[in-house]
Every structure is written in structure tokens, then in C-alpha cells.
């Protein structure tokens, strides 16, 4: 049984990661801002009482991340897989970004960067002791094709794409530093998925995307640390 920690686990890809890892027998720490409102996580908890712990974590708040670590440590001394999934598409959460020249603001950009770019590395930093305690832990950053500089030929959303590209750079640097502990760090593009962020017209269901990403996570080798792959395991251009 592996111990898996997932941020943003109350809906979308995070919820589907939680469901699929539970179904295959793993122990999951499902983190979200408001556990009491996470109805679907609560439904999973009623089925997987011994495997699932729902943990309060607001990734934009350092003290909340620290407190979540204290809670998780009461249940386990090891995290084998950490999935940094929590993120926002715009300053309004999952709503379509509306920023364009003439409306850009420091405060708005920094809000998105705090959650999408900086929070994942802070979460890893706080949970590093539990990752080091694993034998070959894996850190996964849920990125996007919008983070690719090469693919941006038509103008991606300013804050979202730039914040995800920044997360990619954080993860590349991290992948080098954590090698000494046998930890592998990778970036995954889930594709265009039918979530609150992706919308109902997306070609992929959360089930399809997460099934693919879990296959990639299972198969990833230490020598691939720092790579950027899609849900099929194909390389995404930087």
C-alpha cells in the first residue's frame, strides 16, 4: 500500500485521483480548503474509512500547509506520492480568464502565481521529511500545455499560463535537488478535461485523464526526473 497526498482533492482531477488510488488499495490523504463542504470526499470516506483521510489545507496559506503536515504526521511517517493538483484558472477560480492589456494588475497576477507557482514548492518543502522517509518517492506537478512557451503561438491566458510555466521551472530545479534522496519529480499535462476548469465540451473525462496519468506515474523512472509529459506519457515541449 502506497501513501498518496493530493492537493485540491475535493473536485475535478483531484477527486478522481483520490477515487482511483483508493480503488486500487492505496492510502490517500485528500487535502482541500473546506473538508466540511467536500461532500463527494465525504461519500468516499464512508466507503474507504481506513484508507482515506480528508485533511484541511489552503495552499495559499503557509500556516494551513504547516498544520496539514502536523495532521498527516499523526497518521503516517511516509508519503510515497505527492500530487500538487490544486490550482486556479483565473482570479475567479475556475472561471475563464478575462485579463488583457489595459486590465492587468499586480494584485491579480500575484494571486494566481501564489497558488499555481509558489504553493506547490512550499507544499513539497513542508512535506519533505515524509517524502525522504519513502523508498523512491515521487512528486507530481499537475501542469498544462498552456505552460509551454513553444506552443504559445496564439496568446495563452496571461496569468494562468505564466504561473504554470513558473511552476514548471520550480519543479525542474526541485528535481535536481531531491535526487540525493532518491526522489523523482515530474510535470504532467492532464490534457483538456471535462472539469469546472475545462468545461463540458472538453474531449477527455476526468476518469480517462487520471487513468493515463496514474499509468505514467507508475512507470516513471528516476532518470526521467524533471521531465514534462502529457497524460499519455508523451513529451510536452518546453
Image (spheres, rainbow, N blue to C red):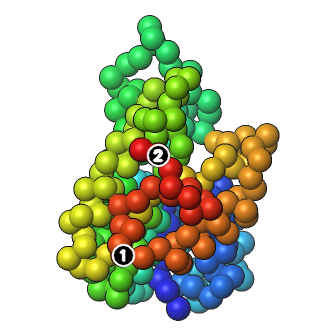
* Quarter holding residue 222: bottom left
Nearest the eye: 122 or 58: 122
Q: Position of residue 33 (x, y in %)?
A: 49, 56
Nearest the eye: 140 or 102: 140
Q: Residue at x 73, y 62 (%)?
A: 208
Secondary structure state at the residue bearing disc 2: loop
Q: Residue at x 63, y 80 (%)?
A: 22
Q: Residue at x 69, y 49 (%)?
A: 193
Q: Is residue 115 left or right of residue 6?
A: left
Q: Is residue 206 left or right of residue 73?
A: right
Q: Position of residue 57 (x, y in %)?
A: 43, 60
Judge whether 16 appears above or below 158 on screen: below
Q: Residue at x 31, y 55 (%)?
A: 172
Which residue, given by chain and number where applicable, does mark 1 sit on? 222
Residue 138 seen in the current view? yes
Residue 31 - label:
none
The Cα atoms of the two marked residues, 1 and 2, are separated by 20 Å
Upstream in the sequence, badge 1 or badge 2? Answer: 1
Judge whether 118 appears above or below 29 on screen: above
Residue 86 seen in the current view? no
* Quarter holding residue 46: bottom right
Q: Is residue 236 left or right of residue 24?
A: left
Residue lying farthest to the top in this orientation: 102
Q: Are marks 1 and 2 in contact (CB under 8 Å)?
A: no
Nearest the eye: 213 or 120: 213
* Quarter holding residue 13: bottom right
Which residue, given by chain and number where applicable, does mark 2 sit on? 237
Q: Position of residue 95 (x, y in %)?
A: 62, 33
Q: Position of residue 135 (x, y in %)?
A: 34, 88
- Quadrant that contains the C terminus: top left
Amino acid at each position: 500500500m502506497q501513501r498518496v497526498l493530493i492537493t485540491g482533492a475535493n473536485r475535478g482531477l483531484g477527486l478522481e485521483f483520490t477515487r482511483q488510488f483508493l480503488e486500487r488499495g492505496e492510502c490517500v490523504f485528500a487535502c482541500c480548503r473546506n473538508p466540511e463542504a467536500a461532500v463527494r470526499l465525504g461519500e468516499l470516506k464512508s466507503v474507504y474509512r481506513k484508507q482515506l483521510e480528508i485533511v484541511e489545507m489552503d495552499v495559499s496559506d503557509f500556516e494551513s500547509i504547516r498544520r496539514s503536515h502536523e495532521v498527516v504526521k499523526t497518521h503516517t511517517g511516509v508519503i510515497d506520492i505527492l500530487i500538487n493538483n490544486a490550482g486556479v484558472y483565473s482570479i475567479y477560480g475556475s472561471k475563464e480568464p478575462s485579463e488583457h492589456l489595459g486590465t492587468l494588475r499586480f494584485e491579480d497576477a500575484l494571486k494566481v502565481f501564489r497558488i499555481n507557482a509558489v504553493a506547490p514548492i512550499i507544499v513539497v518543502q513542508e512535506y519533505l521529511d515524509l517524502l525522504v522517509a519513502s523508498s523512491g518517492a515521487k512528486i507530481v506537478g499537475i501542469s498544462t500545455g498552456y505552460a509551454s512557451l513553444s506552443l504559445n503561438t496564439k496568446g495563452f491566458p496571461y496569468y494562468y499560463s505564466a504561473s504554470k510555466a513558473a511552476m514548471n521551472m520550480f519543479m525542474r530545479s526541485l528535481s535536481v535537488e531531491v535526487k540525493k534522496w532518491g526522489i523523482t519529480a515530474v510535470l504532467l499535462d492532464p490534457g483538456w478535461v471535462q472539469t469546472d476548469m475545462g468545461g463540458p465540451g472538453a474531449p477527455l473525462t476526468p476518469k480517462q485523464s487520471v487513468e493515463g496519468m496514474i499509468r505514467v506515474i507508475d512507470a516513471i523512472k528516476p532518470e526521467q526526473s524533471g521531465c514534462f509529459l502529457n497524460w499519455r506519457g508523451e513529451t510536452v515541449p518546453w
